[in-house]
Image: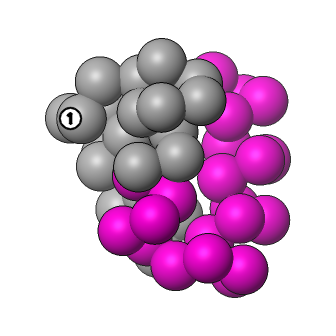
Amino acid sequence: MLAYFAIASEKLKNIGDIKLVKYLREVKGMSMVDAKQLVDALK
């Protein structure tokens, strides 16, 4: 999960939160709830 945190924090700066949730779901295979919680924790 730590690897997702590092990747997500960098991508959040570049693509925004909605597209980041979509990226985490499609590429990393996370559930909607898990991806949203991770993005919210990074804000």
**Is 2 placed above or below 36 here?**
above
**Is 13 placed above or below 40 here?**
below
- Say which residue label 1 marks: 33
- The boundaries of the magenta stretch are 1-21
**Lateral position of residue 33 relative to residue 5, left or right:** left
Q: Nearer the viewer, residue 18 or 39?
A: 18
Residue at image x 79%, y 47%?
6
Q: Quadrant of residue 3?
A: top right
**Lateral position of residue 14 relative to residue 29, left or right:** right
Residue 13 magenta = yes
Q: In the orientation shown, which residue stands out farthest toward the left?
A: 33
**Is 23 placed above or below 27 here?**
below
**Is 16 placed above or below 2 here?**
below
Q: Is residue 23 visible?
A: yes
**Lateral position of residue 3 relative to residue 21, left or right:** right
Q: Quadrant of residue 32?
A: top left
Q: Nearer the viewer, residue 26 or 2?
A: 26
Q: Quadrant of residue 11?
A: bottom right
Can you give x and y, in whole percent of width and height, for residue 41 in the image? 43, 58
Q: Quadrant of the N terminus?
A: top right
Residue 6 magenta = yes
Are there few (<14), some (14-19), or many (20+) residues within 10 Å of tag 1? few
Residue at image x 46%, y 65%?
19
Can you give x and y, in whole percent of width and height, for residue 40 in the image? 35, 62
Count of all numbered marks drawn on residues in the image? 1
Residue at image x 20%, y 35%?
33
Mark 1 falls on what kind of element? Answer: helix
Q: Main secondary structure of the magenta part?
A: helix
- Inspect the image, locate mark 1, and give the three-letter code of the amino acid beneath it: Val
Can you give x and y, in whole percent of width and height, for residue 13 in the image? 69, 81
Residue at image x 78%, y 65%?
10
Q: Is residue 41 visible?
A: no
